[in-house]
Image (cartoon, grey):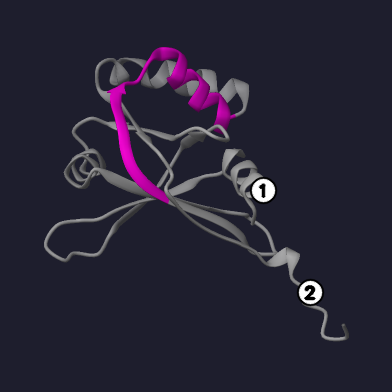
Amino acid sequence: MGLVEREAFLAEARFGVLSVAQEDGVATLAVPIWYAFTPGREVVIHTHRRSRKAHLIRTTGRFGICVQADTSPVRYVSVEGPVTCESDVEPAAREAMAHRYLPPHMARAYLEATAEQQVGVSVAFHMRPTRWRTANYGAMSLDPSS
């Protein structure tokens, strides 16, 4: 995928798989996560400030995200890079993330149900993508007669 196609794909509301190196040769931590991305900007994730994810991201200073199409043909974008910022999650950012992934009525219910758990607890990590891996098998001719 070219730059415009891969950034547009990553900007779509897809569930990501966060990956971050662990200590002592243990396999990479890979977990599903909501994320936000605007073309030309950074990938942003939210997590509990004392989570395993947060600890490992602080330790390594970097993380990766992989997203894929839910249907055939196979298409995916995987990015990794350094963390450029760690900050508290602002209420507007939390609301935007919920509305990115949930229908309006579910987003409101989620935000209400988790409001007290989030105050001063969630942290945002911003990552500048420096390495991209992509595939779009739909762009390939898979017709054996051609």
Horizontal side of 107 relative to 54 (left or right) equals right
Q: Residue at x 67, y 58 (%)?
A: 71
Horizontal side of 65 relative to 100 (left or right) equals left
**In magenta stretch: residue 44:** no
Horizontal side of 31 relative to 104 (left or right) equals left
The CA span between labels 2 and 1 is 18 Å
The image position of residue 130, as x and y in percent, is 42, 48
| Vertical comparison of 54 with 100: above or below | below
Give the secondary structure at mark 2: loop
Q: Amino acid at mark 1?
A: Glu
| Vertical comparison of 42 with 60: above or below | above
| Vertical comparison of 25 with 47: above or below | below
Decide: few, some or many residues near mark 2? Use Cα within 10 Å; few <14, some 14-19, many ≥20: few
Q: In the image, which residues are magenta?
A: 80-102
- The image quarter in which residue 22 lies: bottom left
Q: Amino acid at mark 2?
A: Ser
- Nearest the eye: 119 or 25: 25
**In magenta stretch: residue 90:** yes
The image position of residue 81, as x and y in percent, is 36, 47
Q: Residue at x 20, y 39 (%)?
A: 58
**Disc number at residue 50?**
none
Horizontal side of 115 relative to 21 (left or right) equals right
The image position of residue 133, as x and y in percent, is 50, 59
Which residue position is annotated with label 1? 5
**Disc number at residue 141?**
2
